[in-house]
Amino acid sequence: MTDAKQQRKIIHIDMDCFYAAVEMRDNPKLSNKPVAVGGTSPRSVLCTCNYAARKYGVSSAMSTSFALKKCPELVIVPVNMAKYQEVAKSIRNIFHQFTDLVEPLSLDEAYLDVTNNQSFSNSATLIAEEIRRQIYTKENLTASAGVAPNKFLAKIASGWNKPNGICVIAPNQVDDFVTNLRVDKLFGVGKVTADKLHRLNIKTCADLHKFSLHELVNKFGKFGVALYWQSRGIDNRPVIADRKRKSLSVEHTLTDDVVDKSQIELIINNLFNSFTERLSKLNDNYMVKGQFIKLKDNQFKSHTIEQSGFTGIDGFIELLNKFQLTAPIRLVGIGVRLEYDLFIGIQPDLFEE
């Protein structure tokens, strides 16, 4: 157990354009081309793209037709989730060489708590570098790493020197790091919130420090609490390796807001494949109690509509049809509510006397 007074050592590993990188690795002819992974029909949506494609303004959750307008040379590769899951499993095995406290966020990123790891002179930085080395050696893929005293800072740090980089924020560097951090780097701060902050002349975390918790809550609601603590580099959440899920969902934050249900229905259909892949990997002890859709509008107001039972894609579309669209939508998600039953799957004869 980590002593309450002991400074945590958290690593956040984030694979570099994971799906696209796997496809480029397996097909060297793609190495110098702009590549995206996703649906190949014009009405499909991209899952991800490589850095060459991003130079053209291509991004994940962008429609295939729009991406091709931005980059006519874009090579679009169909999603091969089984392959990505196999690679992710191999990478996760590398993580577990160093700690059992591994909290996956998705196939391509995870938190690791290495506070009590005695290898590499108990250096989280050296452990992160060794993990990156092993990933490259075993899978011929690059990963970026963030090392910090908490999850929030480690996640920001992992994106600091992408691709194929590492950023370390030592405990004595936290104050300086967050003081100079732009507010648009904070989690949950998108274009709308950033514009609101800038209108208040808040551009860095140092500017946020001028406001009390009460003032930020008055101006930003519950999100004001997150702004207050993030701007001070404080995050006491532990890395949780084995938690019982209450829900399972997938979502996409859109590059451009959508304004009609036909666009949202298209996105839901594209999300459904990755959702069913994740659902199929759940432990058999989980039961699905209900399903829901989540929509977030361009004012960051979330709307969740749900129903009991599970009828697959038809159920998600049925929920969408119940929704009254009153503002442009910036995020679309689908998911299910779960219940964990320890005794599901146990043969009845085990209870016979």
Image: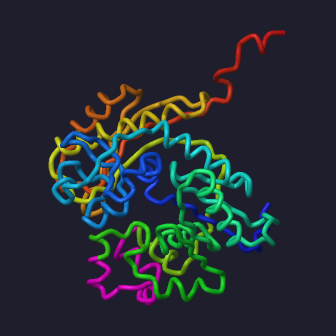
40 w.r.t. 286: above or below: below
The residue lying toward the viewer, choosing from 138 and 199, is: 138
Image colouring: rainbow
Horizontal side of 319 relative to 167 (left or right) equals left
Q: Is residue 198 above or below residue 274?
A: below
In the image, residue 100 lies at what x, y percent? 73, 52
Please name the residue shown 57% across and 70% down the image. Answer: 146
Does 291 sit left or right of 287 as displayed?
left
User: Residue pushed farthest right?
Assistant: 353
Q: Quadrant of the N terminus?
A: bottom right
x and y percentages locating residue 144 in the rendered image: 54, 65
State the predominant SS element of the stretch in magenta: helix
Q: Is residue 211 magenta?
A: yes
Give the quarter of the image for residue 194.
bottom left
Q: Residue furthest front?
A: 29
- Boundaries of the magenta span: 195-222
Relative to the observer, which residue lies in front, 97 or 179?
Answer: 97
Q: Nearer the viewer, residue 122 or 229?
A: 122
Locate the C terminus and report the quarter of the image it occupies.
top right
Q: How many marks?
A: 0
State the image coordinates of residue 236 (x, y, percent, origin top left).
Answer: 62, 68
Q: Is residue 135 left or right of residue 196?
A: right
How far across and down, in percent of the image, does residue 180 sit?
46, 87
- In the image, 260 versus 133, the foreground residue is 133
**Residue ID at (30%, 49%):** 46
Q: Residue 56 in magenta?
A: no
Q: Residue at the spot x=64%, y=58% of the render?
A: 239
Q: Which residue is pictured at 43% across the width and 68% down the height?
A: 187
Please determine whether, in this image, residue 58 is positioned above or below residue 187: above
